[in-house]
Image: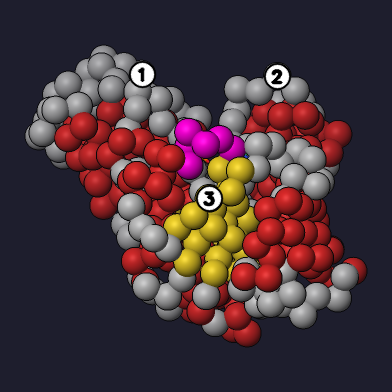
Amino acid sequence: KTVFLSGASGYIAQHTVKQLLDSGKFKVIGSVRSEEKGNSLAKNFNSPDLSFVYVKDISSETAFDEAFKQYGSEIDYVVHTASPVAFDVTDVNKDLIIPAKIGSTGIFKASVKYAPNLKHFVITSSSFAILDLLRENDHSLHLNEQSWNPITFEDSLKDAVQGYCYSKKIAEQTVWKLGKELNVQFGITAINPTYALGPQCFDSSVTSVLNVSCEFVNKLIHSKSDSEIDKSFVGPNIDVRDVARAHIEPLLNSEKFNGQRLLLSNGRFGAQSIVDILNEIPQLKGKIAVGTPHSDDDIQNRMSVINNEKTKELLGFEFISLEKSIKDTASQILKVEGKL
Ligand code: NDP
C-alpha cells in the first residue's frame, strides 16, 4: 500500500516514515520543500520504497495538485503532517494560520479529487487544538478527546503561541468540515499530540538548534550549573516514537479509527522534571541547571486534567515514559557532540 506523507522532513514525520518503511507494509511518497531536503532524507533512509515530491509552500490551495495529479491513483493513504511549528514569527496569520488552514484544505481537496483509491486520511493536529492554554493552571478544567481549545481567530493574532494553537485548531476543523461537506467515503483520524519529545530519527538531524519541542530540552542539556530554570516550560508530553506509531494505527484499521481524535499524552512535566532526569546522567550531573529538585513532581495536581483513556484504549499500547524520552534525547545529543 502507498502512503502520501506531507512534510516528510519534519521531526515527527521522519519517525513516521521510518516506522512505515520498517513495517514492510508500505511504500511512502513524501513531500518536501526542496531537492536538498529530499536528497538528504533519501540518503538517510536508503530505501527503494521511499520517493519524494516537491511542495514548496502549502500556503496555496493548489500546492498539492501537481503531485496528486501525478500519483493520485497509486495513493491508498494520506498522512498530512506539514504545518509551521514556530513561535518566533512576526505575522501570525501569514506565517502560521494561513499555511495550516490552506495546507489542510489543499491536501484534502486534492485527495478527494485525484486519489480515487484513498482509504484513510490522517491529519497531524495537536493537543493545542484541545487544551485551553489560558487555563492551564486551572485544575478544575477537565479535557478529553471531545474538547476544543476555545481560542478565537482575533485573540490568536495577539501572540505566536496562541496563533499556533489557532492554526492547529482551524487546520483540524477544516478537515472534519470538508469530510462532511464532501461526504467522503474514506476514513479520517486526527492525531493530537502533546509536546513530542525524544531523539531525532537520525543523528545527522542533531544540530545546535533543534525543532521547537526538542529545543526546550536541548537548551536544558546545554544549561550552566547556575542557570535559572524556565518555569513557563510546562506541558503534557508524549514520546515522538509513540506519536509516529499512532499515525500508523489508523492505516492498519481504518474502521476502528474513523472519526476519532487521538489525544496523545503521557502525563505532565515542568522544566524541573526534565532537569531532574538530566541530572541522573553522569556526563551532565554537576554541569547543568539544578533548580529545586522534584518541585514539579506533583505538577499534575496543579494543572488542567487530561483524560485520554479513550485514546489509550483505542491504541492499546503502553506509552514510552518521560524518563526514557529525555534520556534517549540526551544520549543522542551527547553522542553527536562526542561527549559520551
Ligand atoms: P517540524 O518543524 O520538524 O516539521 C514541520 C514540517 O512541516 C516540516 O517538514 C516543514 O518543512 C513543514 N512545513 C512547515 N511549514 C511549511 C510550509 N509553509 N510549506 C510546506 N511545508 C511546511 O515539526 P514537528 O515534526 O514537531 O511537527 C510536525 C507536525 O506535528 C506539525 O503539524 C505540528 O503542528 C504537529 N505537532 C508537533 C508537536 C511537537 O511537540 N513537536 C506536538 C503536536 C503537534 P521544512 O522541514 O522544510 O521546514
Residue at position x 81%, y 46% in the image: 61
Q: Is residue 70 left or right of residue 212?
A: right
Q: Examine the rendered structure and indicate whether residue 78 appears above or below residue 6.
A: below
Q: Examine the rendered structure and indicate whether residue 67 appears above or below residue 96.
A: below
Q: Quadrant of residue 34?
A: top right
- Residue nearest the viewer, comparing 258 with 159: 258
Residue at position x 43%, y 50% in the image: 14
Place of residue 64 in the rendered image (x, y in percent of width and height, measured from the top left): 72, 50
- Residue nearest the viewer, comparing 79 with 194: 79
Q: Residues within 10 Å of mark 3 (few under 14, many from 20)?
A: many
Residue found at the far bottom of this picture: 255
Q: Is residue 152 left or right of residue 126?
A: right
For disc 2, the marked residue is: 90
SS category of the residue bearing label 3: strand
Q: Is residue 222 left or right of residue 73?
A: left
Whether residue 176 is in magenta: the answer is: no
For disc 3, the marked residue is: 52
User: Ligand 1: does it lie within 8 Å of the C-beta at label 3?
Assistant: no
Q: CA distance from mark 1 to mark 3?
A: 43 Å
Name which residue type carries label 2: Thr
**Span shown in magenta:** 33-38
Residue found at the far right of this picture: 181
User: Ligand 1: does it lie within 8 Å of the C-beta at label 1?
Assistant: no
Residue found at the far front of this picture: 70
Indicate how the structure is coloured in the image. secondary structure
Q: CA distance from mark 2 to mark 3?
A: 31 Å
Q: Quadrant of residue 84?
A: top right
In primary-sequence order, the first of circles 1 and 3 is: 3
Place of residue 32 in the rendered image (x, y in percent of width and height, measured from the top left): 56, 43
